[in-house]
């Protein structure tokens, strides 16, 4: 693996004329002043036509920010602490309150986000996932270990499947859903469309799972052994064990799903994994201090990496493999979301009760890594722990 430091900047070679007449100087100056307003004027950034839904755990609510004008709207009270919010189908979103075992459906149509319905699926839930096509909603219950499938719009329970042990990780892709369990490690895969069920027993507990975009491979993070294991779908046969320099706590696909980024304790860097033709850890890049949670924008292709122990967010250019910016938001970032148009990065700062807003097109790389200006900080409530972006109704 390669550890790469960042070096930015190029030589600037200038040709200076040896002499210039006063008339020529005045003419050139007038011409340049004529274009000055155009060159220097900054286009005012336009917000995203949608909403940020923020799980504010201490307020037992979901805070709402209108992203078109960055205005805080009336929050949605849930009666218990939410830990996650997820975008759903057709202007819908979901909030999870694990202590009550309840999933809450939020509707953004026709005006602004409102609570549509809430349903208790189990005495306690630890995680929820939606499939990419929005047709499936899955939840896992730890106390009486089970995988639950619910209708994404009515929240009615469709199926309940018993698990081998308490769930540790959950992911889905279309009708496929994978769950890792412990303390006796297991990975279970189900195909909701065919009824197929497969189980494998890894050597150590798996704490994160990610399907490859084509659903032909499942990637499993093994923190104890610092391994990323690639499993064939559906039989879960091991394709490869990829050694990592860090404990794989966080997994993040690039926007085109062609690269997987891995971060965690052990090294101040991010591993880049190619999960397709040449399955390999391509290299490990230095990425700020104690890299933690990550998020990717599409165009430009940037990787945002939050520090686990600091207050900054490191920004890497995925194409050039270089660090181009460092944003200090005052408190540790606990989650980052990117708007679908790749214009804005939204970072929750749990300790301060704020959400940092970074304007992505304004990021400019330079040798001082100061090319990422913070657009604004919004007070959103007590302990913001998770954020999802949903478009406004047309």
Image (tube, helix red, strand yellow):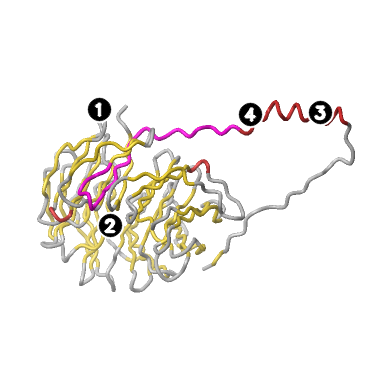
Residue at (46% x, 52% y) in the render: 303
Q: Disc 3 vs disc 2: Cβ atoms closer than 8 Å?
A: no
Q: Disc 4 vs disc 3: Cβ atoms closer than 8 Å?
A: no
Q: Would residue 325 be found to the left or right of residue 337 on screen? A: right
Q: Which residue is mark 4?
A: 37
Instruction: Pick whichever, 125 or 153, lies toward us.
Output: 125
Examine the structure image and report whether residue 374 is included in the region drawn in magenta: no
Instruction: Kindly report the distance in space between the C-alpha atoms of the residues bearing marks 4 and 3.
Output: 18 Å
Instruction: Kindly report the distance in space between the C-alpha atoms of the residues bearing marks 4 and 2.
Output: 60 Å
Q: Earlier in the sequence, mark 1 or mark 4?
A: 4
Categorize mark 2 by other alpha carbons within 10 Å: few (<14), some (14-19), many (20+): some
Residue 153, percent across and down?
18, 38
Where disc 4 sits, the SS reads: helix
Q: Would residue 257 be found to the left or right of residue 161 on screen? A: right
Is 256 drawn above or below residue 190 in the view shown? above
Q: Which mark is residue 234?
A: 2
Residue at (51% x, 44% y) in the render: 300
Q: Which residue is mark 3?
A: 26
Where disc 3 sits, the SS reads: helix
Instruction: Kindly report the distance in space between the C-alpha atoms of the residues bearing marks 3 and 2.
Output: 74 Å
Q: Which residues are magenta?
A: 41-63
Residue 393, percent across and down?
30, 29
Residue at (51% x, 41% y) in the render: 361
Q: Which residue is mark 1?
A: 110
Categorize mark 1 by other alpha carbons within 10 Å: few (<14), some (14-19), many (20+): few
Categorize mark 4 by other alpha carbons within 10 Å: few (<14), some (14-19), many (20+): few
Where disc 2 sits, the SS reads: loop
Quadrant location of the C terminus in the rendered image: top left
């Amino acid at each position: 693996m390669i550890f790469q430091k960042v070096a930015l900047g190029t030589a600037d070679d200038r040709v200076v004329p040896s002499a210039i007449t006063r008339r020529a100087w005045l003419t050139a100056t007038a011409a340049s002043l004529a274009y000055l307003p155009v060159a220097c004027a900054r286009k005012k950034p336009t917000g995203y036509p949608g909403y940020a839904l923020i799980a504010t755990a201490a307020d037992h609510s979901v805070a709402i920010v209108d992203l078109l004008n960055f205005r805080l709207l009336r929050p949605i009270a849930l009666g218990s602490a939410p830990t996650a919010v997820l975008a759903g189908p057709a202007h819908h979103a979901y909030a999870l309150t694990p202590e009550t075992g309840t999933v809450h459906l939020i509707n953004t149509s026709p005006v602004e986000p409102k609570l549509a319905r809430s349903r208790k699926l189990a005495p306690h839930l630890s995680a929820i996932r939606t499939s990419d096509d929005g047709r499936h909603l899955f939840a896992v219950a730890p106390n009486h270990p089970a995988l639950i499938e619910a209708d994404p719009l009515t929240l009615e329970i469709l199926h309940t499947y018993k698990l081998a042990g308490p769930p540790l990780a959950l992911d889905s892709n279309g009708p496929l859903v994978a769950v890792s369990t412990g303390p006796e490690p297991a990975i279970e895969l189900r195909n909701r469309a065919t009824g197929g069920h497969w189980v494998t027993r890894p050597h150590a507990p798996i704490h994160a799972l990610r399907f490859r975009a084509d659903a032909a491979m499942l990637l499993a993070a093994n923190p104890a052994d610092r391994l990323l294991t690639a499993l064939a779908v559906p039989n879960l046969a091991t394709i490869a064990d990829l050694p990592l320099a860090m404990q794989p706590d966080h997994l993040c696909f690039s926007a085109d799903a062609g690269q997987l980024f891995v971060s965690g304790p052990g090294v101040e860097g991010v591993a880049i994994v190619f999960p397709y033709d040449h399955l390999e850890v391509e290299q490990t890049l230095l990425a700020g201090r104690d890299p933690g949670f990550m998020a990717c924008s599409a165009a430009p292709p940037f990787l945002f990496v939050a520090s686990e122990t600091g207050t900054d967010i490191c920004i890497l250019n995925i194409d050039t493999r270089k660090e181009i910016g460092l944003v200090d938001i005052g408190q540790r970032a606990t989650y980052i979301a990117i708007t679908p148009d790749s214009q804005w990065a939204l970072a929750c700062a749990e300790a301060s009760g704020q959400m940092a807003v970074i304007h992505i097109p304004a990021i400019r790389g330079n040798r001082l890594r100061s090319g990422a200006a913070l657009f604004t900080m919004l007070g959103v409530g007590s302990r913001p722990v998770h954020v999802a972006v949903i478009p406004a109704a047309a």
